[in-house]
Image: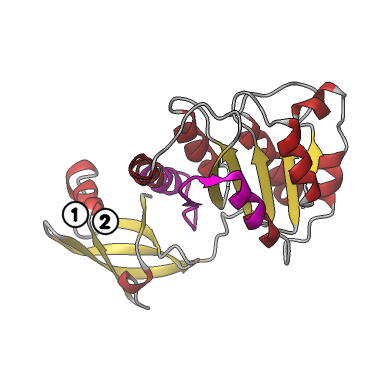
Amino acid sequence: MQRYFVTPDQMTDSTVRITGDDVKHISKVMRMSPGDQVICSDNQDRVAVCEIEELNDSSVELTIVEWSEFETELPIPVTIAQGLPKHDKLEMIVQKGTELGASKFLPFQASRSIVKWDDKKSRKKTERLLKIIKEAAEQSHRNRMPDCEEPVSFKQLLSVSEEYSIKVVAYEEEAKQDERSNLAKLLTKIDPSVDRMLVVIGPEGGLTDEEVERLQEAGFVTCGFGPRILRTETAPFYILSAVSYQLELLR
């Protein structure tokens, strides 16, 4: 069943009103008509099966048939702080990261980030990323859409990290030294009722020694993601899959 996100004010206790680009998708792409059903989420954990009552060029009016209690979010919020990578890698990271359960994406300007985003490019790129996130969240039946911030500086990243109780930095030097226990230990100690996780992943050239030291001073634990060296666009998927395995499949 097709899923659509709406704003909280578009969903009452009994009805939903869909507007914007989703109207065209429902009528022209999916070719739906009154009587067809979809799933609607207000992005605040209210999810319902809805039936189309009326459809026109500007809106779709629906009646709520039943509320859904099925949970599709990771038990712990995981923010992926990604050093700005080259080309369109960030688009793949947010798309697949959304499918795997990330709650937020925080791109940052690392010392070895080759690409530079000015204010105009940053806004345009972020809008594009948010659109990709919305589509991926609908496809993967997420109850919530992850957020995506405009890129921040490394200093700002350190400041933001104070909000998190579990802080991980992917460090390839640990993998080279065959370090395999730090991440496993952290995952087994997670308390989903209170913890929030922030994962820092460097760009293609990795993080500098100075950046790693400053992260460690801020409470980050350096972790090898297995014995192999992962690409920057692969590392987020590894950690999200590990969190899912530990907190969803083993419990």
Viewer-proximal residue among 121 and 58: 121
Numbered range of the magenta stretch: 131-159
Amino acid identity at mark 1: Ser
* Relative image position of residue 27 (x, y in whole percent): 18, 49
Looking at the image, residue 174 sits to the left or right of residue 205; the answer is right
Amino acid identity at mark 2: Asp
* Relative image position of residue 172 (x, y in whole percent): 75, 27
* Residue 169 against residue 143 in the figure, above or below: above
Query: Picture quarter containing residue 208?
Result: top right
* Residue 160 against residue 186 in the figure, above or below: below
> Do residues under tags 2 and 1 come within 8 Å of each other at their CB atoms?
yes
User: Which labelled disc corresponds to residue 123?
Assistant: none
Q: Residue at x 61, y 33 (%)?
A: 111
Using the rendered image of the protein, determine whether residue 131 is visible from the camera's viewpoint.
Answer: yes
Looking at the image, residue 14 sits to the left or right of residue 183; the answer is left
Query: Label 2 belongs to which residue?
Result: 36
* Residue 112 against residue 78 in the figure, above or below: above
How did the renderer colour the structure?
secondary structure
Query: Label 1 belongs to which residue?
Result: 33
